[in-house]
Amino acid sequence: MKMRQTMTHSDKDRVIIFDTTLRDGEQSPGATMTHEEKLEIAGLLDDMGVDVIEAGFPIASEGDFRAVSEIARLSRNSVICGLARANFGDIDRCWEAVKHAAQPRIHTFIGTSELHRTIPNLTMDEMAERIHDTVTHARNLCDNVQWSPMDATRTEEDFLCRTVEIAIKAGATTINIPDTVGYTAPRESADLIRMLINKVPGADQVIFATHCHNDLGMATANSLAAVEGGARQIECTINGLGERAGNTALEEVVMALKVRGDIMPYATGIDTTKIMNISRRVAAVSGFAVQFNKAIVGKNAFAHESGIHQDGMLKNAETFEIMRPADVGLSETNIVMGKHSGRAALRSKLENLGFELGDNQLKDVFVRFKELADRKKEIFDDDLVALMRTSVDPETVRLKVKSLRVVCGTDGPQEAALTMVIDGVEASTTATGDGPVDATFNAVKDLFDHNARLQLYQVHAVTEGTDAQATVSVRLEEDGRIVTGQSADTDTVVASAKAYVSALNRLLVRRETPEIGYDTKGVNYKDVS
Ligand code: KIV
Ligand code: ZN
């Protein structure tokens, strides 16, 4: 797999997959992952054959630095990349983190469009000099340097060519062309890369990359078009996670190249059978559920419910399917589990769904599985995924819901009687509210006073039927820190209480992680000096 880094320009048909779930994806408000979660996702990315993992933004915080350093140390096949603004401090810090990898990369960037140039207040000449100095500095530290002109798709063509040429001369080995605001369209995306390759001296010495955001829903199309134009690296995230409408979805570009190899003869090194598992894990740890009709990884992507479809599918699966569920790691059997299923069966089923469990984790999940089986006759794959998604690390749990009783009715305010365990001490209260969930949340606030603002409250039914579990996501914001908690239960109000408390537990962990430099969720582009 070392060929990933040493790939030469003659490998015309190989497209490098650069995953930025842990950097651009994690930058999405509310998608914060814990240190352990980041390591787990990096391990899965490495396992599935991702060529380059952008593991974080080391200058952003102690936490980011630690995560990038450890991911670098643990990396096996992937190149490990860190992000740095166009200043020596960022680049040095990035190198300190990625240097532990067998194959490190520094990725440095600066906004080159007219709008972005005004932020650090640099003239074109000053910016050109800055690019030369910073890329040279990065290259003196590391053989593998990626440079990005942020907002490239809105940068004046001449200036873009000039800056790309400077970066190449200064030693950049990959030139990434970001569509930062998701503004470009497929033909333009291809033309831009083609123009750069044709016009910029030295362009044949480097790999061109495409980095698209999905504001107009064109990220996948734009990335594939860029490949047609000559790009040989696609930057993407699992589930399309990312700020605003997200980034290009890894699973979409990879499966498009695989399924339509007839008209797009480009290969990736991705083991596509690992897609579903990592998609579920990223949804679980980021708190960003995958929309049901999302291409490739949505719950309905392979479901055929209409009568005509089912009839056709029974006769020949190819009637309506252009890829097999197994190609993306979706098990075709949905074996139902129930209260008589044992621990070994649960372990094997979870392994089948892509979850590797240690003995302690299995013990915890088995207890919760039995509790669920007492309330729900049939436990489907999706129920187990929801159980796994809502597993919590006992070390980070300071608040717990012990019991909840809610009185509902058509007349009058609803009332919630709640008992919680807070730092080992039991406390109870009764609160009213406008509906059972509001009453419950008021009771939580009563017992654990805080100023966090509720940003999002979302409920999904996991399976069909009136005994279906509900998965609830709660996003809270406090002093710029955004966290998401999730829980699942056959009782929607109980799931809501637990999701709220889970978000508070995450907030308590975040309060203890000081951020240095700047807010990790909003790059301070001004500070490039
Ligand atoms: O979208 C963007 O421009 C980026 C850069 C930092 C590469 O994420
Ligand atoms: Zn981006």
Image: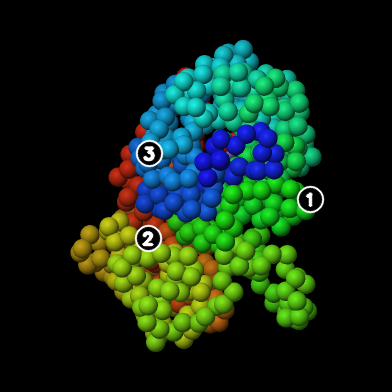
Q: Which residue is mark 2?
A: 502
Colour mapping used in the image: rainbow
Q: Amino acid at mark 3?
A: Ser
Q: Nearer the viewer, mark 1 or mark 3?
A: 1
Examine the rendered structure and indicate whether residue 379 appears above or below residue 177.
below
Q: Quadrant of residue 210?
A: top right
Mark 1 secondary-structure assignment: loop
Element at label 2: helix
Q: Position of residue 347 (x, y in %)?
A: 40, 73
User: Which amino acid, by three-letter code, is at mark 2?
Assistant: Ser
Q: Is residue 359 above or below residue 111?
A: below
The number of numbered badges drawn on the structure is 3
Determine the CA span between mark 2 and mark 3: 28 Å
Residue at mark 2 to residue at mark 1: CA–CA distance: 47 Å
User: Residue farthest to the left?
Assistant: 425
Q: Give the x, y percent position of residue 66.
A: 35, 40
Q: Position of residue 177 (x, y in %)?
A: 65, 33
Neighbour tally class for label 1: few under 14, some 14-19, many 20 plus, Cα within 10 Å: few
**Dot 2 and dot 3 residues touching (CB under 8 Å):** no
| 2 vs 3, front mark | 3
Q: Is mark 3 within 8 Å of ligand 1?
A: no
Q: Secondary structure at mark 3?
A: helix
The amino acid type, in three-letter code, at marker 1 is Ile
Circle 1 is placed at which residue position? Answer: 263
Res 23 visible: no
Q: Looking at the image, is 276 positioned above or below residue 250?
A: below
Residue that numbered label 3 is attached to: 69
Q: Which quadrant of the view contains residue 5?
A: top right
Decide which of tag 2 and tag 1 comes sooner along the chain.
1
